[in-house]
Image (spheres, grey):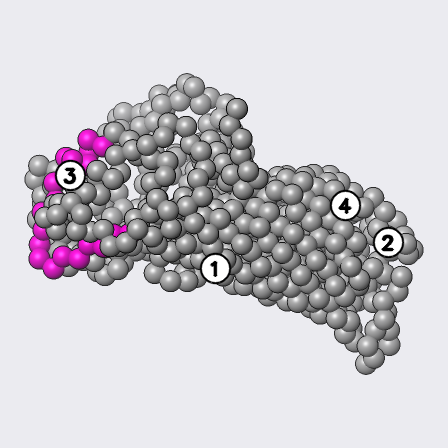
Amino acid sequence: MTKYTLGQFLVLSAIIISSTVSLFAQEQLGLRLSNYAGINSTILNPAYHSTTPFSWDVNLVEGAVHFSNNYAFLRQINISHLIKNRDQLEFALASDFTEGLTPGPNTVVVDFFSFNRSRNFYAMSSVMGPSFYIRLTPQHTIGFVSRARFVASGRGIDNALSYYQYEPKPFFQDINVSPFRLASAAWTELGLNYAYTQPTSNGQFSIGVTVKALQAYEGGFFRNDDRFFLQKLPNDSLAASAVNFSYAYTDSNIESDDYAPEKNGNGFSVDLGVVYTIEGNSDAIYDWKFGASLTDIGVLNFKQNASFHEVTIDDLTAIGTQAYQDLQGIEEVDELIETFSSQVLNDPTASLQANDFRMALPAAFSLQASKSIGTLAYLDATLVQGFPMGDAALQRGSLLALVPRFEHRWFGAALPITISDWQATRVGASVRLAFLTIGTEHLGSFISNNDLYGTDLYVSLKINPFSIGSGNRDRSSGWEGRGNTKMRGKKGRVKCYEF
């Protein structure tokens, strides 16, 4: 029996999840924003657990998968139907059905978007392992996070390369291709979290940080640095000019039938966040809550089983594609890279520049705002904006969300309404029963027969104290002993905690 370390087990779980779901949660808002989320909320903002009522909180396991793109979609179908009928379904391109022909009952039609926008995709899977926080005093909280992640992203792919733009192009006509980037990586994180909370005249202010040591397992990227011109040629060939490509990858598993995670490097990252809460006159945990955070500020350094390549050509160069069409599997990637180098540089090893490379994590800036509506209900607004940290980087898109949620100590529900990349609007849902949370930010992908271009799912199981604090109990909300986090005092004076 093969034995794995905790890091290997977590990263293997993340990759298996991403590869076995028919279509791949972007930010898991139904879990991150909850006042009962505990250590899990620090993924969005490392200070966000400062308003949770628990003196300690332990995550046992959390899993999440997400996929979204604006290049291709499946016509009028949902994830539930795909999973239920996976053995009977056949897939066909929309272009196969000319006028008068219709697909059969078990045929899934693959179609392509035709709007005039750049093409993007984002896929992720993550497994959050044993993680916890302990509130040492009302001011000081420490925590630990273990997590494995797989992320793949593509940003800025020119509309000229979309299916309905590229396919009808005649031979020898220039296709203008803008700079774009593709990247993917699998890694694990072990992080230490610290949050400091200071009373204010009308609430509290918290600042948090999570410092993470990373283990890099697999990674790769392809970057087109400059605008270039592409032409379709007869005999399945292409021509390109003014090309400036850089690409890198790890090859520790490309010749293995059984995937076994192998550490190929390391890295370092940090998350920073602040939270400010304002008390009200109701029995709600707070009246207003505001947060801001920077997450995934860091890099992965791939030092083993790694190669970095660059290709720069100025003159028009023809490339025969037959050699690449004969590619049988990922184990032939090295041969493919050498073939490409031979075609454009006349030397199979000329493109190789180094045996190591670096990749930046999918960094993001986030703003959060929450307003209580009575004792049990809250309305949250969240903005997440991804940005690249360097030329070789995984990259998030943007997300704007409005999240009404209902929360009791022993149950809760949320209805996230999100806009991704300022294009697609989705409605999600999450439900929490005591220590179990299940949710999605794309509910329609499971229940509605619409054009399917992505999906999203997350689940979390944790434990925390049955009894919260030792103060008076608010029987309507289940919030007991709010003196752990809620402060009293006269306006204008520094408040003291009640115990």
Contact check, label 3 and label 1, Cβ < 8 Å:
no
Sequence-earlier tag: 4 or 1: 1
Tell me the quarter of the picture where residue 498 sits. Answer: bottom right
Q: Which residue is mark 4?
A: 464
Which residues are the magenta region? Answer: 308-327
Going by the image, does 362 lie left or right of 342?
right
Percent position of residue 347, x then y: 12, 47
Within 10 Å of the Cα at label 4, are there few (<14), some (14-19), or many (20+) other Cα atoms? some
Residue named by callout 1: 298
Q: Secondary structure at mark 4?
A: loop
Q: Are there few (<14), some (14-19), or many (20+) residues within 10 Å of tag 2?
A: some
Mark 3 or mark 1, which has the lower sequence index? 1
Amino acid under disc 2: Gly
List the residue tagged with mark 3.
Answer: 321
Q: Amino acid at mark 4?
A: Asn
Q: Nearer the viewer, mark 1 or mark 2?
A: 1
Residue nearest the viewer, comparing 87 with 403: 87
Q: Are marks 4 and 3 in contact (CB under 8 Å)?
A: no
